Image (cartoon, helix red, strand yellow):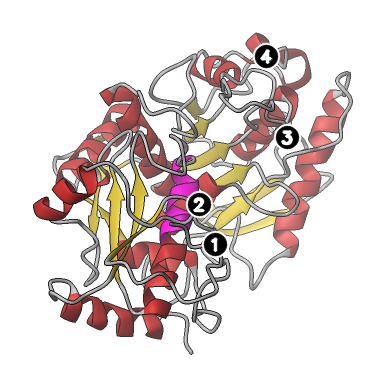
């Protein structure tokens, strides 16, 4: 027995099992007036268990340093970024069991590399950038901090990933899109990645499709939601998935793409969140000298870390 | 209606009816093998968005929300209820839900 029309009264069975369902704001019976904010609803329903929180805090200490013990330990501040390149993007290890091949390419490896380099460049030099991705080839390059592994060193320089931190497996796809036989470590990695992304002072993501952000990024944003008031005071930033750059793009073109994005984020102020929460005053200077990463566009006049 | 007032109202309903013998439930399910859905539950982000949709279904239909996420891990190994909506199935419900799926589903 199915429930073919979910806007109608559900079948009168005691346990109604939803095995697929719509996304959070999809139509359903008698709920057209129920306004949903994913972040609020998520935080209303979920929080990490005490045991998993301990694992997360330990992982933070392992990755970023810091002192003390328990969940109140002081931690090094970091920013985070999720890069969803797509199930059929170059470097993906997704193996479809669908009859029709999946066509899901959101970014090329080069575009992903530019996005990470750009966000890392806008991050204060003492803060690491934690990156999680669905892409095996990108993850391998990030783990080695070697853009040459994805042929991006010529464009971005050999130290483009020097602030990048990753964790978990390499040569793997971390998310159970179709697969259920994950190892225990692999399963934990899905939640560890999400928890570490959520813990970033600022969170950037790539992977929008037709204006809609990826579900994983939505999950992380929900996890980041600080309270139930409806105000999300922990900003997130979307870096464009596609930059429309040719494979032979120049370094200048990459800088230009980065600059354009930073300018756009600046234009979102004052109602939009700041790019970097730990920067209390900053201004964008398009003609400023390039920083050590070659993309520095943010002049920081005061850098206050409010732990 | 303010963004979260329905949540408070539903949380009170959930608490009052969670163990009601006459309660009706709606549960998000992900098992390795499920009737009507094969083994595809989607990625984790997808699932959480579906759970929030299921929450709205539960609120609209006045049913008690459960989250029966069993594959590739039990969700309760990582997350727990944050507020008054205890979405965790009981042991008795888990035994019932682990049986071959012959109950109603949204295909």
Q: Nearer the viewer, residue B92 or A134?
A: B92
SS of the residue at dot 2? loop
Residue B18, percent from left and from top:
17, 72
- Name the mark on residue A157: none
Q: Is residue A57 magenta?
A: no
Q: Which residues are magenta?
A: B43-51
To the question of a shared chain for discs 2 and 3, the answer is no
Instruction: Quote the CA–CA distance across marks 1 and 3.
Output: 52 Å
Q: Kindly identify the residue that appears in the image at 54 percent across and 62 percent down.
A: A4
Residue annotated with mark 2: B107
How packed mark 3 is, by other alpha carbons closer than 10 Å (few <14, some 14-19, many 20 or more), is many
Does A154 sit left or right of B84 as displayed? right
Choose mark 3 or mark 4, whichever is in front. Answer: 4
To the question of a shared chain for discs 2 and 4, the answer is no
Residue contact at pointers 1 and 2, CB within 8 angstroms: yes
Residue A143, percent from left and from top:
49, 17
Residue annotated with mark 4: A150
Q: Does A87 appear above or below B54?
A: above
Residue A194, percent from left and from top:
41, 42
SS of the residue at dot 3? loop
Q: Kindly identify the residue that appears in the image at 59 percent across and 47 percent down.
A: A214
Instruction: Quote the CA–CA distance across marks 4 and 1.
Output: 46 Å
Residue annotated with mark 3: A295
How packed mark 1 is, by other alpha carbons closer than 10 Å (few <14, some 14-19, many 20 or more), is few
Residue annotated with mark 1: A4
Choose mark 2 or mark 4, whichever is in front. Answer: 2
Q: Choose the circle earlier in sequence order: 4 or 1.
A: 1
Instruction: Quote the CA–CA distance across marks 1 and 2.
Output: 7 Å
Do we see residue A304 in this rendering? no
């Amino acid at each position: 027995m199915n429930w073919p029309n979910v806007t109608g009264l559900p079948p009168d069975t005691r346990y109604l099992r939803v095995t697929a369902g719509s996304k959070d704001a999809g139509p359903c019976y008698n709920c057209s007036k129920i306004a949903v904010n994913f972040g609020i609803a998520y935080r209303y329903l979920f929080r990490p268990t005490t045991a998993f929180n301990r694992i997360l805090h330990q992982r933070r200490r392992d990755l970023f340093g810091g002192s003390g013990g328990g969940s109140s330990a002081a931690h090094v501040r970091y920013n985070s970024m999720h890069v969803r390149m797509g199930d059929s993007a170059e470097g993906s290890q997704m193996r479809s069991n669908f009859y029709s091949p999946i066509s899901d390419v959101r970014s090329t490896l080069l575009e992903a590399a530019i996005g990470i380099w750009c966000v890392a460049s806008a991050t204060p030099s003492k803060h690491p950038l934690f990156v999680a991705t669905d892409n095996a080839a990108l993850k391998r390059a990030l783990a080695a901090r070697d853009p040459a592994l994805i042929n991006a060193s010529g464009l971005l320089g050999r130290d483009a990933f020097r602030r990048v931190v990753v964790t978990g497996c390499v040569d793997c796809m971390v998310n159970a899109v179709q697969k259920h036989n994950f190892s225990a470590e692999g399963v934990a990695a899905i939640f560890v990645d999400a928890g570490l992304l959520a813990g970033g002072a600022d969170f950037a993501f790539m992977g929008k499709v037709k204006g809609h952000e990826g579900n994983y990024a939505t999950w992380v944003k929900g996890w980041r939601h600080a309270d139930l008031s409806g105000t999300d005071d922990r900003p997130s930033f979307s870096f464009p998935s596609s930059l429309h750059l040719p494979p032979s793009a120049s370094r200048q073109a990459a800088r230009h793409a980065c600059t354009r994005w930073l300018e756009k984020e600046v234009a979102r102020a004052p109602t939009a969140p700041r790019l970097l929460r730990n920067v209390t005053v900053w201004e964008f200077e398009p003609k400023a000298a390039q920083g050590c990463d070659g993309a520095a566009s943010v002049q920081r006049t005061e850098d206050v870390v409010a732990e | 209606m303010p963004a979260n007032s329905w949540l408070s109202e539903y949380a009170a309903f959930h608490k009052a009816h969670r163990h009601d013998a006459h309660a009706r439930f709606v549960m998000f399910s992900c098992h390795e093998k499920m009737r009507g859905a094969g083994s595809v539950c989607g990625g984790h982000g997808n699932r959480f968005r579906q759970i929030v949709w299921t929450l709205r279904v539960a609120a609209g239909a006045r049913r008690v929300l459960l989250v029966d996420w069993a594959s590739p891990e039990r969700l309760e190994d990582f997350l727990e209820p944050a507020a008054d909506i205890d979405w965790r199935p009981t042991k008795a419900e888990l035994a019932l839900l682990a049986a071959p799926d012959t109950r109603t589903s949204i295909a």
